[in-house]
Every structure is written in structure tokens, then in C-alpha cells.
Amino acid sequence: MNENPDENEKVDFKKHWNAAYQKSPVTNLGWYEENPTPSVELIESCNLPKEALIFNAGAGATTLISELLVKGYGNIVVNDISSVALSELKSQLPAPMNATVQFVVDDLTNPSELLKIKNVDLWHDRAVLHFFTEEKQQKAYFDLLKGALKPKGFVILAEFNLEGAKKCSGLDVFNYNEEMLQKRLGTDFVLLKSFNYTYTQPSGNIREYVYTLFQKKL
């Protein structure tokens, strides 16, 4: 667990993440996934219709969106606090399919535009929630999630697990296990799947994740 849970409160996240994407090629970033297989497999297991609204929280320049477009999903909202990251992502998406993707630059812990997002069928977060080390940040995040997701909607949370790194990109992180995520979501959500996953960074270093799939009750 993080020993200094208020450290990230002092960070200008927008400035930090814009700088991270400006100073290095996307493929060199520690969280870059060439093949986002765990996420794709969990999303496919939900058996969603292709027109389902999929929300990707803190997407950065993920390869997941291209994968989903190729698979025929055409109603995707992509969010990040970094406009630089989303510009990079947009430039990499296959045309003309990218026209179906909505891009929202906003802060998950202090949302404005994101408050308009409703009736989400699937909320996906890989390596975002664990950067919110303050209680008020975590509460804001989960309040937003619960308000956006429709009944019977799905949530994928993939965060550093309890054996995982305690810092990433120079920032402290808050490590999770499935029970902690369940507690945060509350009794209105059912855990469908959970597994630990070892991710190998472009540098060759490894990071330990917990992947979870929840479904909201009626």
C-alpha cells in the first residue's frame, strides 16, 4: 500500500501526463501494450452488442480502441486528462472507423464534461484508478462510474495489485485486490471474474496487475 497517500494531491496531473506523452514515443512508455489481450478477452466475454456504449477511462494512447473498432464496436467514448495523449491516439486510429469515437478531455476526479456521459454499457479502466491516492479522488471516481453506468452494465478495473509496484511514472500509486475494488463499488455490483496478470513493459521490467470484471445489478 502507499505510505504517502497525499503525495499525488500536489501533482498537476494534466501537466504531468501531457509531458509524459510529449517527451517519449508512445511505444516506449511503461504502460504501452502492443496487444491488450486481457482487456479484449474480458470485453468479449460480456457478449455486448456492437452498438453498446463502451467508455474507456484514462485511455492515453491505448491500442485497445483500434482493436475494438476492428472487431466492430462502433460506440466508444475515450477519456483522458491529457489532450496530447488523445491527439496521439486519434492519429493512430483506422479511418473511417475513427469517426465513431468520441474524445473527452476531462479529469475523472473533478469531472465536468464527463458528467454528461450516461447509459454506459461497459466501463474500462486499465492503470488509471491506482493513481488516485486520496480518499476524495477515489470517491469522485467511483461516484462518476456509478452515475454513468446503466443497470446490468459491466466494469473492468485493471490496477496494480498488492504485490505490484508502488510507483509509476514518478507518481505514487494505490494498490488493490478484488476485495478492495468490490468494497469500493458496493453491494450493487457482482464480481464475475478476477485474475492476477504479469505485464511486461517495453523496457523488459514487469508489473503485477489484478484484472476484475464486475456487473451492476438491476
Image (cartoon, grey):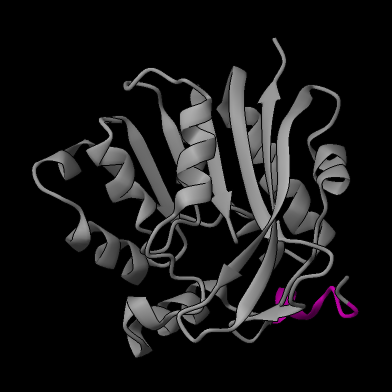
In the image: residue 192, left or right of residue 3: left
Image quarter for residue 98? top left
Kindly give the residue lying farthest to the top in the view shown.
218
User: Residues in magenta?
Assistant: 3-10
Specify the quadrant that holds the C terminus: top right
Quarter of the image that includes the N terminus? bottom right
Residue at image position (71%, 80%) is 167
Quadrant housing residue 168: bottom right
Residue 118 in view (yes/no): no
Does the magenta run of residues contain 157?
Answer: no
Q: Residue furthest bottom?
A: 23
Q: Compare residues 11 and 45 and report the one nearer the observer.
A: 45
One can see residue 152 in this view: yes
Q: Position of residue 184 (x, y in %)?
A: 82, 42
Instruction: Please indicate whether residue 77 sits to the left or right of residue 39 in the image.
Output: left
Q: Please provide percent x and percent y for residue 112.
A: 51, 46
